[in-house]
Image (cartoon, rainbow, N blue to C red):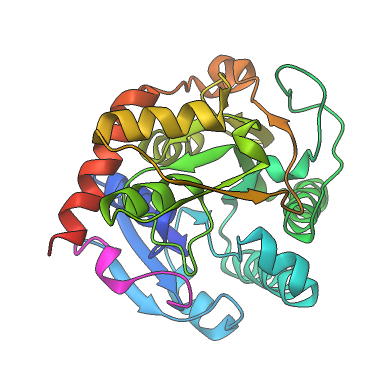
Amino acid sequence: MSRTILVTGGAGFIGSNAVEMLCDGGFNVRVIDDLSWGYRDFVDKRADFLEGSISEADKLIYLLKGVDAVIHFAASSIIKFSIDNPVEYVKNNIENGVNLLEAMRKSGVNKIIFSSSAAVYGESNVRRIKEGSIKNPLNPYGATKLSFENILASYFNCYGLQSVSLRYFNAYGPRDEQKPATRAVPIWIKALLNNDPIPLYWHGRQVRDYVFVKDIARAHIDALNLSGCHIFNIGSGDGVMMQDLLKEVSDIMEVEPKIVDMGERLGDPNRLVADISRANRILKWKPRCNLYDGLVQTINYYKSVMNK
């Protein structure tokens, strides 16, 4: 018998890719999304969709009937907005998250896979960050993700609610239609397609770990088989300097970029690269898509949607 999964925030970038993969895998999928950040058209037609917020307990109780596990993407995720509106981020990412956990407890649903972030670490001077590395978030967004991880640990210890927190590093891929756009890869691709200037922060010298969205989506499905309370880094395990990433994108597109120096940006660590050995060992997960192939798929996606 197929398992039934509730996906919160399933109309967004990573959520919609996970929903599609779950449907392909034969799961029964239910989606709740208030469409403040997501798109109804992104939700796979095989999934049952309800427009709503995880702040609405009655809708959650209705959707959780017969559910085997929850995959939780519903959160605010723009770092600059978290700096400008910390109260809103605490409400959505922590208070509404606890509302979801309470609805799960009342419904007898005992497993959640949580969309966390490498933003919990802040600045790090180690070559590759392990899950046990010092956590020092540079912005309210990272702080809310770390706080909710701690809440999940408390729910496991107090109520036996099982959880897996996945700390993504830099996600990229099809359907990254952030409102407004803040992630480099889609901004650069769209700018190059339109022959617009490329914004580049810190002279492109930051080092980041880019992981393809479908590899991230697969990690959530792999995590459904784990028991207990776990935390994993989800990245490629390799760093790329942002100026080199821009060269890779522009070389694939065969366009010479016109760069605009944007200077420094608040909340940006200098280096953020994952140690993914724990995910490989326990979750049996590792990325399958290399950076070049992932960029080609992403570029082709934006070419197709911008030509419509």
- The chief SS type of the magenta part is loop
Q: 234 or 238: which is nearer to us?
A: 238
- In the shown orientation, is residue 285 left or right of residue 139? left
Judge by depth and name the residue closer to the eye, 19 or 255. Answer: 255
Q: Is residue 142 magenta?
A: no
Q: Quadrant of residue 143?
A: bottom right
Q: Nearer the viewer, residue 180 or 276?
A: 180
Tell me where residue 42 sits by quadrant: bottom left
Residue 24 point in image, percent of width and height: 22, 44
Whether residue 282 is visible:
yes
Identify which residue is drawn at 61% across, 66% down.
76
Q: Is residue 41 magenta?
A: yes
Residue shown at 74%/75% (left/top)?
Answer: 91
Task: Kindly indicate the quadrant of the structure image that contains residue 176.
Answer: bottom left
Start and end of the magenta stretch? 35-45
Q: Residue furthest left?
A: 308
Q: Position of residue 25 (x, y in %)?
A: 26, 41
Q: Residue at x 47, y 71 (%)?
A: 37
- The foreground one among 174 and 22 is 174
Q: Position of residue 16 (x, y in %)?
A: 35, 56
Looking at the image, residue 266 sits to the left or right of residue 192; the answer is right
Q: Position of residue 130 (x, y in %)?
A: 74, 23
